[in-house]
Structure formats: C-alpha cells, structure tokens
Image (spheres, rainbow, N blue to C red):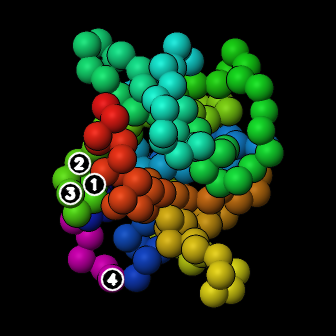
Amino acid sequence: MENIPGNNKKTNSAAASEGKYLTFSLCEEDYGISILKIREIIGLMTITPVPGTPEFVKGVINLRGRVIPVIDLRVRFSLFPLDYTERTCIVIVEIEKKSGFLTMGVVVDSVSEVLSVKPEDIEPAPSFGTKTDTSYIEGIAKIKKGVKILLNIDKILTDKEVEILKKNS
C-alpha cells in the first residue's frame, strides 16, 4: 500500500514529507512540490496584471473560463529577475489555508520530473536564524545529483496574501 502524506501515522517531518514530488528549477536551484497539490502544468500564457497587488503577484489568467491568480516564485523568494523563456511554465496548484482552498498558478523557470522521495533521503530544513522564515520548506531531499528543496506550498503565502488573491480573482 502506498504511503500517502496526510494519511501517515508517523510523526517525524521526514516521514510526513515522503511521497512523490513535481520537481522544477528556479534560478538554477531544484525544488519540489508534493504531487498531491499539483492540478496541472501549462505553458506560459498571457497574464493580466492586477493593480494594487504585491510585486510577486503577476496577475490573473483565464484558464478554461476560470480566473486563476498567478504568482512568480522567483520574485516571492527574492531571487534575481530573469526573462521568461520557452521552458518557463505555470504550475497550477491548490493550496489550503484557514480561509479555505485556493487554486493558483505558480511561475517556474522549468519543470523537471516527478520524483519519489523516501523518508531516509529527507533532512529537516536548516535553521537560518530568527529573522529568516523557512516555514515553507518541508525539508531537503538528498538526491544522487545533489539536493532538492521540498516546499510546503500551503505555507508560501500568508493568510492575508491569500485573501488579497481571492479578492482579485
């Protein structure tokens, strides 16, 4: 029987993070988001800016009749800006907050693969001091080719930021 995050009775964070992850690149670093949070991957399309939103909010898209807010993870993580390329894409995710669920798009440099991660391959997120919030990092997956930062997509945005996105979509 497959071990599904969320239905896991183990309490350590590595076991809770075990599972399949969609991996992608940002600024030549590798990240992963639980496949259970991914709805689909689409090519870059026209994003309509929404005035008055935070800088990392690129705007909204019309996806088969649904208005979906889109954020740029590169900007959210304060990484240096890069022009979008033919490999840039939007990953449609569903996040869960106190106020409910939100479907949103996340712009990434490129999508790599779906990777199965075992608990023994996951280290806890390192501490970078009290001024750096790393609560959105589930852990660091040790892979043969290096490491992948596993993200908890539910914690990328604050409740207040989610409310802003909901109002504008």
Q: Hey, which residue is sitting farthest bottom in the picture? A: 130
Is 81 in front, or is 3?
81
Q: Position of residue 157 (x, y in %)?
A: 44, 56
Q: CA–CA distance between discs 1 and 3?
A: 8 Å
**Would you say 133 lies left or right of 28 here?**
left
Between marks 1 and 3 in the image, the one whose residue lies nearer the viewer: 3
Q: Quadrant of the C terminus?
A: top left
**Dot 2, crowdedness within 10 Å: few (<14), some or many (≥20)?**
few
Looking at the image, is 158 positioned above or below residue 80? below
The answer to whether residue 43 shows anywhere in this view is: no
**Would you say 84 lies left or right of 62 here?**
right
Q: Quadrant of residue 120 in the image?
A: bottom right
Q: Which mark is drawn over residue 99?
A: 3
Magenta stretch, main secondary structure class? loop
**Dot 4, crowdedness within 10 Å: few (<14), some or many (≥20)?**
few
- The residue positioned 40% from the left and 33% from the top of the image is 69
Between marks 1 and 4 in the image, the one whose residue lies nearer the viewer: 1
- The residue positioned 58% from the left and 39% from the top of the image is 72
Residue linked to disc 2: 101
**Would you say 1 lies left or right of 146 here?**
left
Q: Position of residue 59 (x, y in %)?
A: 48, 29
Are dots 1 and 3 in contact, CB under 8 Å? Answer: no
Residue linked to disc 1: 96
Q: CA–CA distance between discs 2 and 1?
A: 4 Å
Which amino acid type is marked by label 3?
Ser
Magenta residues, start to end = 7-11
Q: Position of residue 159 (x, y in %)?
A: 34, 61
Residue linked to disc 4: 11
- The residue positioned 29% from the left and 41% from the top of the image is 166
